[in-house]
Amino acid sequence: MPHRYGVLTERLLDILIASLNSHRIPLKMGWELLELYQYGRLDSPKGRLILKRACTISEPEKTKMVLRRDVR
Amino acid sequence: MSDRPAFTVELVPRDPLWKTALLSVICERLGFDGLWVSDHFFNRNVFIALTEIAHRTRRIMLGPAVVNPYLHHPVTIAQMVATLHELAEGRVRLAVGAGDSISLSRIGIKRYRPLERVAQCVKTVRDLLSGKTMTNLRLEIPATVSPPIFVGAQGRRMMEVAVEVADGVLVNWSNLQRLRESSKIVAARLGGRDGFTLGAHLIVSIHEDPAKARKTAVPFAAYLMVGSSEDILDSLGVSANMRDEVARCLTAFDWERLYSISGGEWVDYFSIWGTPARLEEDISVILEMGYNEIVFGGPLGPRPYTAIRTISKIIGRLKRG
């Protein structure tokens, strides 16, 4: 069964996967994200932080909008 | 043909390797049966990507689709498949095709006698993997491997080659009429032979807003259109000038211009785009034609992660019947 992540994490994953700017994300951060996903830890505080960072690097405006919506 | 249809995804390794690997893990978790990784010399290397995917996944089938004998010598293909098998025993498949003549011409390779080259490549790879010695040549890899070998095809004669030499065919059309014609060609050639996989390799773009789905499909449909024969383009009313202009847009990454000239029906012809409901209807029709593998390729949608999750739900419903 696929691991179910929270709504914010899913929205950020949507941004991350759709981005054409993934090359801007440091490779080390990319591999760390993969490990976090693989072991179901993207929703942990560390996982969420790295996912937010990666999304902000690749798609700053879209990430800002999603995070703003989350705060509301 | 196999009983239960397989639902697979084509990954294009144009992004950093970690992202392709992430997508492979996502696909495995969502219940897809397999992954095909495309091979273009301008993207990340297909076999290195498959190596990482083999490490990261446990269940899902995997293989390159499609490699061509102009860019890779059959011996090299056999060697890479045999090595990949050691990482993912029993999960490896291979698809061979003639390649894209426009891409090959960019590196000075002329695609001559594609039918013969593909057929010979499949035979050579199969022989080498089974441990045969061929005129002073054999692989020094002890285990014999017999991965299912597919041929990627669009035309009638390549489909016939597939039936003759391979275990399956990946029909590279995203048009229901063409897929129906292709299924008849293959069925006639098979003459009731079992165990052959008839795969539909689709360019898919889905979104709740069909206009967004169509826009995302345009560049992918354009690549196929530009590489199509004049007969097909004539039937679609695409002039040589239009084709050249689309080709120029693709080469120059001039997307705005490409979108502005992509109002024609050729986008519908070379891709399946629309709402998830439309995709589900089309997949049901394709399965009824006798296809027993559906490869979801292309952009998948403006939001590929959402699209993959949506497609996995569609598959769940189709599997439950």
Image (cartoon, helix red, strand yellow):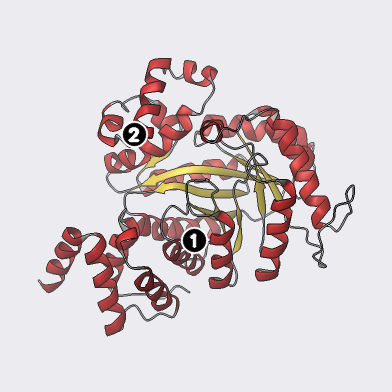
The x, y position of residue B259, in whole percent, is 28, 32
Amino acid found under the numbered disc labelled 1: Gly
Residue B315, above or below B244:
below
Q: Residue furthest bottom?
A: A45
Give the residue at mark 1. B316
Q: Position of residue B88 (x, y in %)?
A: 65, 68
Q: Nearer the viewer, mark 1 or mark 2?
A: 2
Q: Residue furthest left?
A: A72
Q: Position of residue B199 (x, y in %)?
A: 61, 45
Q: Are marks 1 and 2 in contact (CB under 8 Å)?
A: no
Q: Chain of mark 2?
A: B
Please tell me the numbered disc located at residue B252: 2
Identified at 24% across, 71% down, the residue is: A53
User: CA–CA distance between discs 1 and 2?
Assistant: 40 Å
- State the residue in front, B226 or B178: B226
Q: Quadrant of residue A34?
A: bottom left
Any part of residue B17 in sight: yes
Q: Which mark is residue B241?
A: none
What residue is shown at x 53% (from left), y 41% (from top)? B285
Q: Is residue B188 left or right of residue A52?
A: right
Crowding at dot 1, Cα within 10 Å, few <14 / some 14-19 / many 20+, comes out as: some
Residue A36, percent from left and from top: 39, 78
Q: Is residue B168 above or below residue B144?
A: above
What amino acid type is highlighted by mark number 2?
Answer: Ala
State the SS at label 2: helix
